[in-house]
């Protein structure tokens, strides 16, 4: 059995991890770490301590009405993408432990196109 890093749990919600394949399970936000536990495989889990999290990037659509997914960007281990039934509530729970200046919005489709076009016409030195 896996030992949780948290001593106090703020939120437990059903979620999906997009690491390799889609894994369905439970997401736990607590005082020490962000944790994901797979429903079918007990050995498949992700534990990310808050000290390891560099920033949180969320895909925001329709002026904040819908958040389909978010990613935790860590200092050493890379990016971990997750989704849940209610991402707004989950991101508010994460915001207790991650400062607001580290919570970022990802670029929209048109923002990526605009940046790409600007880079095409930029003068190289």
Image: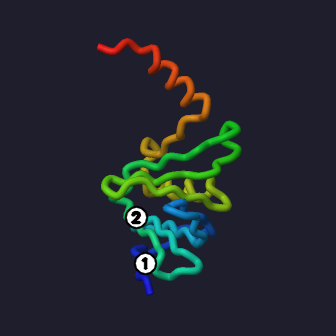
Q: Residue at x 69, y 47 (%)?
A: 66
**Quarter assignment of residue 65:** top right
Q: Look at the numbered discs 2 and 1 and tell me whether their residues touch, using CB distance below 8 Å.
A: no
**Quarter assignment of residue 123:** top left
What's the CA distance linking mark 2 and mark 1? 11 Å
The answer to whether residue 35 is left or right of residue 65 is left
**Quarter assignment of residue 114:** top right
Dot 1 falls on a residue whose secondary structure is loop
Q: Residue at x 42, y 48 (%)?
A: 55
Q: Position of residue 119 (x, y in %)?
A: 45, 21
Q: Which residue is mark 2?
A: 48
Question: Residue 61, relative to residue 14: is it above or below?
Answer: above
Q: Which mark is residue 44?
A: none
The answer to whether residue 38 is left or right of residue 98 is right
Q: Position of residue 43 (x, y in %)?
A: 46, 80
Q: Which residue is mark 1?
A: 4
Question: Residue 67, relative to residue 44: is it above or below?
Answer: above
Colour treatment of the image: rainbow
Q: Give whichever of 110, 29 is nearer the camera.
A: 110
């Amino acid at each position: 059995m896996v030992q949780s890093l948290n001593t106090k749990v703020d939120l437990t919600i059903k979620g999906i991890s997009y690491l390799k394949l889609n894994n369905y399970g439970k997401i736990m936000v607590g005082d020490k770490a962000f944790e994901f536990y797979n429903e079918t495989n007990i050995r498949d889990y992700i534990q990310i301590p808050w000290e390891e999290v560099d920033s949180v990037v969320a895909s925001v659509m329709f002026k904040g009405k819908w958040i389909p997914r978010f990613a935790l960007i860590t200092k050493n281990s890379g990016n971990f993408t997750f989704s849940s039934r209610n991402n707004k509530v989950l991101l508010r729970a994460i915001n207790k432990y991650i400062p607001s200046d580290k919570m970022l919005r990802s670029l929209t489709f048109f923002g990526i196109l605009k940046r790409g076009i600007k880079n095409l016409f930029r003068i190289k030195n």
